[in-house]
Each structure stands twice: as structure tokens, then as C-alpha cells.
Amino acid sequence: MAAVQGHLSNGADGPDGTEAGGEDTPPAFRHAVAALCGVRVRPEVELDPTPPPRRLAPYSYALEAVVTGASDDEELAEGRLILLHDPAGHDSWRGTFRLVTLVHADLEPEIAADPLLPEVCWSWLTGALEARGLPYGEPSGTVTRASSHYFGAMGAREPSTRIEIRASWTPAAHPAPEPARPGPRRPEPAEEGAGEPLGVPDTAGHLAAWCDLLCQIAGLPPAGAAEAGVVSLPQRRGPQAR
């Protein structure tokens, strides 16, 4: 996968064909997508916007990622994260936003043989969210372990095992502030962009937790505190060399 390039206002169309950054797109969704585009990731993780599915929700945005090893040609894990938004709400989501992911990686034989591997992989997902203090609800998913054995002309290859996590969860929105004590009210002009709008989850935090999951399934050690921060994803202009 090419290095991060990105056309960040694209890739999510509303019911009438409006773009994610268009005037007809709900402000809550625009804010959620903008937050995704400001997350800094580890140098081993490469992120790219990718066309999202069009039928899962009125509004959607997707990112794909690959975790590389010592060489850029060595892919340790890869995945896709999709942000869905339905302003009318969704009964099964119990909210207006939903995150959907697919993550997979090849495993070392000794790890693949662990009978508790599916439970451990699922705990990596929930643990990544909880480690960052991200409230969420209605988690659902599967963990699949698939072994491959090679024969004939491919018989010299060692058996391999691939793990795949398919999951979705509802990111909790920012809670409403506590009511102010009774007293004289003096309206103050709100600063544009100040604070988090109500009803919008911390999508940046969920993306960071998802990258933690990717790195964990790839076998990388935990990231240091020095890697916390924010950068922007560049604009997509076409293929770039590594």
C-alpha cells in the first residue's frame, strides 16, 4: 500500500450524493471525519482513505492500514476501519455512529497453536478501547483462525496460520454538560471549533485504539509516550514511491 496520501473530504457520500465535506452533510459527521484525519500513528502504520461501502448507512468513511516491519515490503498486519453514521439512529447500534473493522495477520506457529487465541485476540480489541478510556456499546464480531498447508509445487513452503478479526461497536457520544446552577444568564459568543459538539464520539481516540490493536496483532511492542500527538493526512495526488 502506498504511503499516506489521502483525499480526505472524499470517500463518503450522503443519500443524495453529497461529499463528506459538503454543505449538505451533517455537521456531526463532518466533525467525526475531521477528527479521524488528525490522528498521529506510529511510523510502522500507514493509513490511507479508501472508498467506503455505500449501503451500510447514509454516511460512511473508511480508512485502510498496513503495519510494516523492518522493511517496507514486510507487511505484518493489515486492516480496514469504517465509520458509519445514520442521523436518524439505528436500533441495533443504539446510537447514530458505528465503527466496523476487519483486521488480519499471519501468525507464528507457536502463537497460532494456542487454543485460547480467539479469546485473546478479541480481548486485544476491547482492551485497546478500554486502555484509552473510550466508552463503547453493543460490541459484536468474530475471530477466525485459518491454517494453510501446501502441496505439490508449493510443498516446500511451511504451513501458515492467518488470524482475522471482524468486529463492530458503537462509540459513545460526548455526554451533555451538567446543568448550570440557577442564576443570571449572560449569553457569551461561542468560539468556532471550541470543545466537542454533542452527539459526536471521540473518533480520533477510537482510531488510535484501533491502530494499537493492529500493532498488537502484528507483534510490535507497545508504543512509547513520545509518539502521542497529532498530524494531518496529506492530500491524495496519485501513486507515490516508498
Image (spheres, helix red, strand yellow):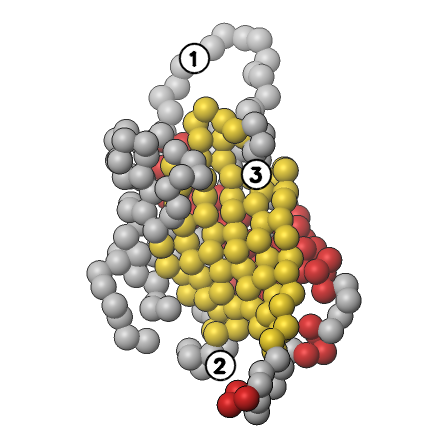
How far apart are the two marked residues, 2 and 1, measured between alpha carbons? 58 Å
Left or right? Give the position of 87 relative to 171.
left
**Visible in this render: residue 229?**
no
Residue 217 at x, y percent in the picture: 60, 66
Q: Residue at x 58, y 73 (%)?
A: 106
Tag 3: amino acid: Thr
Q: Nearer the viewer, residue 58 or 47?
A: 58
Residue at 42% in and 58% down: 64
Q: Residue at x 39, y 19 (%)?
A: 188
Mark 2 neighbour density, 10 Å: few (under 14) some (14–19) many (20 or more): few
Return the x and y of residue 195 as percentages of the image width and height.
45, 34
Considering only order in the chain, which callout, 3 or 2, is on the residue closer to the N terminus? Answer: 2
Mark 2: which amino acid?
Answer: Ala
Q: Which residue is located at x 57 percent, y 53 percent?
A: 166
Question: Which percent across, then down, holds residue 137?
Answer: 63, 37
- Identify the residue position indicated by label 3 in the image: 170
The tag earlier along the polypeptide, 1 or 3, is 3
Per the image, label 3 sits on a secondary structure element best described as strand
Left/right placement of residue 134 relative to residue 21 reads right
Q: Residue furthest front?
A: 152
**What whole-number distance in Å separates the C-alpha atoms at marks 2 and 3?**
35 Å
Report the quarter where the N terminus lies: bottom left
How dense is the environment of label 3, judged by Cα within 10 Å: few (below 14), some, or many (20 and up)? many
**The one of 18 and 164 positioned closer to us in this rendering:** 164
> What residue does disc 1 label?
186
Residue annotated with mark 2: 70
- Tell me the element at label 2: loop
Of helix, strand and loop, which one carries label 1?
loop
